[in-house]
Image: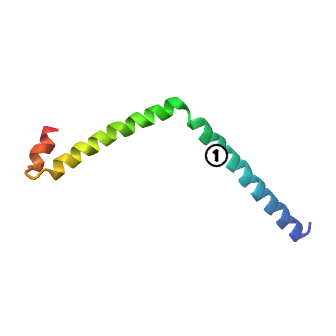
Amino acid sequence: MNSSLIFVLLLVSIVMSAKVIETWLREKRKKSENPEELEDTLSKIDVLEERVKVLERIITESRFDLKREIDSL
């Protein structure tokens, strides 16, 4: 076989493989965006936001004993 023909075939196979992988990843992403998983993720975000608010409150208090506050949590 001619080396240029092998190069062209290799290039075409790489491009086709990339398209297959891209399509597979796109479908996988669509499947993972189900409503139950979204609700679970949103509830976790809400819990984390509340924890950050508590930590911000502790840190921004004018008088705070960090060790005491951490032990009380």
Please state the horizontal and vertical placement of residue 53, each as a whole percent of the image: 26, 44
User: Which image quadrant: the C terminus?
Assistant: top left
Q: In this view, does 1 lie to the left or right of 14?
A: right
Residue 33 position by quadrant: top right
Q: Residue furthest right?
A: 1
Residue type at mark 1? Leu
Name the residue that disc number 1 marks: 25
The residue that appears at 68% across and 50% down in the rendered structure is 22
Q: Which residue lies furthest to the top in this view?
A: 36
Count the numbered circles shown. 1
Residue 3 position by quadrant: bottom right
Q: Is residue 6 above or below residue 67?
A: below
Question: Looking at this view, is 27 or 1 the one in front?
Answer: 27
The residue that appears at 12% across and 44% down in the rendered structure is 69
Q: Crowdedness of circle 1 by 10 Å Cα count: few (<14), some, many (20+)?
A: few
Please state the horizontal and vertical placement of residue 65, each as a whole percent of the image: 8, 49
Q: Is residue 72 above or below residue 18?
A: above
The residue that appears at 11% across and 48% down in the rendered structure is 67
Q: How is the image coloured?
A: rainbow
Q: In this view, does 71 lie to the left or right of 15?
A: left
User: Which image quadrant: the N terminus?
Assistant: bottom right
Helix or strand or loop: what does disc 1 sit on?
helix
Please state the horizontal and vertical placement of residue 11, each as a whole percent of the image: 79, 63
Q: In this view, does 42 lie to the left or right of 53?
A: right
Please state the horizontal and vertical placement of residue 56, each as a whole percent of the image: 22, 49
